[in-house]
Amino acid sequence: MRVLDLHQISQEKAVEEAVESLATGNLVIFPTETTYGAGVDALNQHAVDTLLAYKTRREGKPLSIAVADARMASQYVEVNDSAHRIYQRFLPGPVTVISRSLGKVAPGVESEFGTLGIRIPDYPLILEIVNRLGRPITATSANASGGKRPYSISDLLSQLSEKQKKLIGLVLDAGQLPPNPPSTVIDTTLSTPVVFRQGKLELVQNQVQTKLHSGDEAETKGIAQRLALKYWSAIKDTGLVIGLNGSLGMGKTIFVKGVAEFLQIPEVITSPTYSYVQEYAFTRHGISGKLIHSDVWKVDSTAEATRLELASFFKPGHLVIIEWASNIREYLEETLAEHQLPYIQVGFSAISHQLAQRQLLIQEPEASAG
Amino acid sequence: MITPPLILAIDTSCDDTSAAVVWGQVVLSNVVASQTQLHKQYGGVFPTVAKQAHRENIEPVIQLALSRAEVTTAELSAIAVTQGPGLAPALEVGIEHAKNLASQLSIPLIPVNHIEGHVLSVLAVPKKVGASKEQLRQQAVEVNRKIEELELPVLSIIVSGGHTEFVLVKKPGEYQRLGFTVDDAAGEALDKVGRMLDLGYPAGPVIEQFAKLGDATMYSFPLPMTTSGNANLSFSGMKTAARNLLETERLKKELSAQQVYDFCASFQKAVFKAITYKLSKILLITPCFGVWLGGGVAANMALRATLRQTIKPHQLKLQVPYTKKMCADNAAMIGVVASFKFQRGEEVSKFQTIERIPRWELD
């Protein structure tokens, strides 16, 4: 273990030494804007194994990598729109952006779900080292798992075993670092939508469109109730599915509250975003059934949708309302065709976003319209 | 001295498969699947939503919980399982598994309400490190005995992605729901507004970090339900207000990093203000000896600080779960609830009578 005092040598020299050490597979302790980090060449399996041995018990937690810029990041992960905007806004800086890995780093670096954290440290020395090395280095904090985050080299060495110390090739000592918090981790891999673009309702069956304006929440509830009344016999005879689409904060849950009033459900309808599905029993005019309120905002694949078993609710007496239904369009196309249930889509959009006014675009089966 | 029961607890109420072993209120192990290396690749990013995922996880998770606790199934006094609220197909997996296990071992099965788990999560105690089994038993006896010294009632506040409620705890097993959200949960509002700010998912923890860098007076949000005359909460209007505000700002110019920090600080403050506003109203008319906090958002330090400030004039102390893991969904808290039920003799010996209760309110 060699220790270089960064106050005693030029940055040029420090970069040169660090690059050489990393290129030969060594573990290098380096300063960042958050804490001391432990870096190895993220493409070198042997070096990564050394790092994993150094960090001890990881419990499957992924390591992140430091890259020089967004261009370099895009060689190792899929940078989606969301990640791209975060790079522009927050990097370089104390933010780790998680994306789907392209599988180019050594095994053990990316998470078991195939995701990888990207750091662009706001620390010119490190950016220069990575640039010169031409490949990413791991950017985990230098403490062993469970240990305190080190802000000085003496802090660090005091918590390491002899065995761990032996694994270190080079230490870049910048003295006492300010006690900054660790980087904030932003996971961009789950594509929960923010907006639903109006006019993009897919025509599942032969559907006709109606545009309605709603001035406030009470009117939205009224529209929902008239729709439920119109399809009351369908609910009884075959069951009915209503898909709701609209940006966050558009009043989709208000619509469901309106339907619940129509069905004379006494309970308060609360958001099912986290439970995915909530069931409410109803009895109206002596007919008993169930309102199934689902929210698939967090569901972004047919495989996930299948596991929710929504189609098991498609039966007579059931009204199934699905928020963010366009997220699971393929699943719905398949299962609706199979179960032969009428399907209504409602798209919500703002007319003037300062007011509670909404435009509701309703698509319903041709035969029932008018 | 009564030795409290040694319980294997299972929770499959939503995204995570969890199993834990508790000795009374002492947590011997607490395994949550997403935090371990048990997963296989599901193709999706998160191994959730899911009967299938729970089915694959449950046995390895239970085995890991037992081995970490250094307990064999022969030593167990009972099996506890979350019966609701939660996602029905997910709950079924845990319940079926628990039924079979209890039946095989011929020990009682104890159904538990997940919310009650969050309420009593503050009573969970970590096991003494390096203690022998006999020392752990003594610890369990001692911790269990101290429950009698609890000054009750206390007010429990549950704040998570799926729930936001005020629950009066008269004693373990006897609750009164004083108020709850009528639309979105607080954690959900934070996640969704964070998502509007492009902070990924889940965004709640990112908001907490960024709020520290921001000025909470930069943006203002309406305080909801001030005239409702009850202790209920609503976050959906704040979410819409945030959306409108962001659209107005973005029409001018794309948000800078500092504006995002300010927005996080302002919105988080508004969400917590809505909670403390109702909390103050409750404390004025509801005598209690303390305030407990549970649920995923209970890990948020800013929330804890705000709550402490609010209850200080009432000479009340805030009690929080002993680790962040105990705030999130986990099976140990289910075991803690079961330890009380067991001692009250509330167990189910007819295994067939347990069915899932997807929406189960505490009261």
Image (cartoon, rainbow, N blue to C red):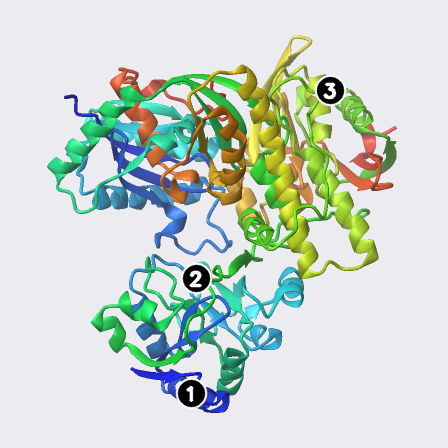
Which image quarter holds the N terminus of chain B? top left
Q: Amino acid at mark 1?
A: Gln
Can you give x and y, in whole percent of width and height, for residue A156 in the image?
Answer: 33, 68
Q: Earlier in the sequence, mark 2 or mark 3?
A: 2
User: Which structural element holds mark 3?
Assistant: helix
Q: Nearer the viewer, residue A58 or A113?
A: A58
Of all chains, the one bearing label 1 is A
Tell me if label 2 and label 3 are in contact, CB under 8 Å: no
Question: In this rendering, is residue B183 above or below A353?
Answer: above
Q: Amino acid at mark 2?
A: Ser
Q: Specify whether disc 2 shares its chain with disc 3.
A: yes
Using the rendered image of the protein, determine whether residue B285 is visible from the camera's viewpoint: yes
Of all chains, the one bearing label 2 is A
Report the disc number at residue A8. Answer: 1
Q: CA distance from mark 1 to mark 3?
A: 82 Å
Tell me if label 1 and label 3 are in contact, CB under 8 Å: no
Of all chains, the one bearing label 3 is A
> Which quarter of the figure has residue B124?
top left
Q: Amino acid at mark 3?
A: Trp
Q: CA distance from mark 1 to mark 2?
A: 38 Å
Circle 2 residue: A111
**A297 displayed left or right of A212:** left
Can you give x and y, in whole percent of width and height, for residue B320 in the image?
Answer: 41, 35
Q: CA distance from mark 2 to mark 3?
A: 49 Å
Report the disc number at residue A232. Answer: 3
**A325 displayed left or right of B289:** right
**A47 displayed left or right of A191:** left
The residue that appears at 49% across and 39% down in the rendered structure is B304
The residue that appears at 65% across and 8% down in the rendered structure is A286
Q: Earlier in the sequence, mark 1 or mark 3?
A: 1
Can you give x and y, in whole percent of width and height, for residue A177 in the image?
Answer: 45, 69
